[in-house]
Image: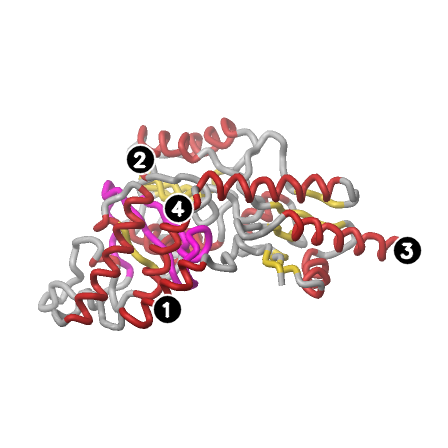
Amino acid sequence: MTNFDNAATTYPKPLSVRRAAMEAIRDYGGNAGRGGHELAMRTSEALYSARETAADFFGAQPENTIFTLNCTHALNMAIQGVMKDGGHLIISSMEHNSAARPSFTLAAEKRITLSIAEVFADSEQTVDSFRRLIRSDTKAIVCTLASNVTGQLLPYREIAALCRENNICFIADGAQTCGIYDIKLDSGINILCTSGHKGLYGITGTGLLITDGSFPVSPIIQGGTGSSSLRLLQPDILPDSLESGTPNIIGAVTVGAGIRYISSYGIDNIRSHEESLCRLFISELESIGSVTIYRDSKAEYAPIVSFNIENFLSEEAASLLADKGFCLRAGYHCAALAHACLGTKNGTIRFAPSVFNTETEVKKLVYFVKRMKNLQNS
């Protein structure tokens, strides 16, 4: 089985991450922040170490680094928390449903007003699209750093500057860039949301919300935090305010291990390898013909390639390739807005390699795509 669906969840995980998971199960069986005994203290130290690792990696403060269930959880916390008292919200036309659905729900309930900024291949046009939608009551802009469908990189630094000029909170979805690009809060991001199980190589059930503290995030979940236990209102200090209930200790420890793996391997080396596999894949596909690749020469892309094979539905083609041992995502990728923007009514097939994939695996995949075309033409 060859996994080219790493945009959904990276697999395999680095050996160091697998070891960290086993060590966490063996050694960190206490409840962090909820007890003064040795087991609880040891577990608390492990959680804090992972928090420090993540904070340092993204240029944040540990107390402003929140562990979540996934990127969807983080985005919901950020969007609903920042927009709690209403106002105008702008999202991009390439957003994943994890950002689009909470935004549309708030708008449908008439708790906020919502605008969608069209994304273009040209970065200046995209920035202008956001700029034209800003109003006096605009409170936040939500923008994916790279489309999970095509990998198109959005001009997030320029959008961040636009937000600074207008005192608008910039909420960034880094699910497809964190661990592949050197994303830091000092680039102008106010709240960064990302998954722990994709480019950071942690196990599933992990995510991060990282804030620079400029804009308050009201909690959408209240409960036990291990602090201020006699107070019946949620604590207002971070990370406690946004981390109700027992945290995912094992998951947090694996995210910390994944980040250390990235730092050791080199984030530029990871990106360079994945980009080279995408270039190889594209060049091989182009030699086949009758294949549509959803990239524009004017845009820049993360290492993701969306494509379709003529006369095959995306899910049909992916199923045939799965029978040959290749894992690719087909369909709509939980991104209704992006597919509406692309005009891909039947979805696409998504190729998303990881640092563990090889050129040989890519060539084998292309070989079977060619066989599909040959069988169809015979």
Do the numbered discs 4 and 2 sit on residues whose CB atoms are within 8 Å? Answer: no
Q: Residue at x 72, y 50 (%)?
A: 366
Q: Earlier in the sequence, mark 4 or mark 2?
A: 2
Specify whether residue 170 is in view.
yes
Disc 2: which residue: 186
Q: Nearer the viewer, residue 288 or 290?
A: 288
Gap in angstroms between the C-alphas marked 3 and 1: 52 Å
Q: Is residue 152 above or below residue 352?
A: above
Disc 3: which residue: 378
Mark 3: amino acid:
Ser
Q: Earlier in the sequence, mark 4 or mark 3?
A: 4
Gap in angstroms between the C-alphas marked 2 and 1: 35 Å
Q: Residues within 10 Å of mark 1 (few under 14, many from 20)?
A: some
Gap in angstroms between the C-alphas marked 1 and 4: 21 Å
Q: Earlier in the sequence, mark 2 or mark 1?
A: 1
Check residue 69 for magenta coloring.
Answer: no
Q: Is residue 216 above or below residue 206?
A: above
Q: Nearer the viewer, mark 3 or mark 1?
A: 1
Q: Is residue 225 left or right of residue 69?
A: left
Q: How many marks?
A: 4
**Outermost residue toward the right?**
378
Q: In this picture, which residue range is highlighted in magenta? A: 191-220
Disc 1: which residue: 22
The quadrant the N terminus occupies is: bottom right
Mark 1: amino acid:
Met
Disc 4: which residue: 264
Magenta stretch, overall SS: loop
Q: Position of residue 36 (x, y in %)?
A: 12, 69
Q: Is residue 86 above or below residue 225?
A: above
Q: Position of residue 219 (x, y in %)?
A: 26, 57
Residue 227's quadrant in the figure?
bottom left
Q: Is residue 293 above or below residue 47?
A: above
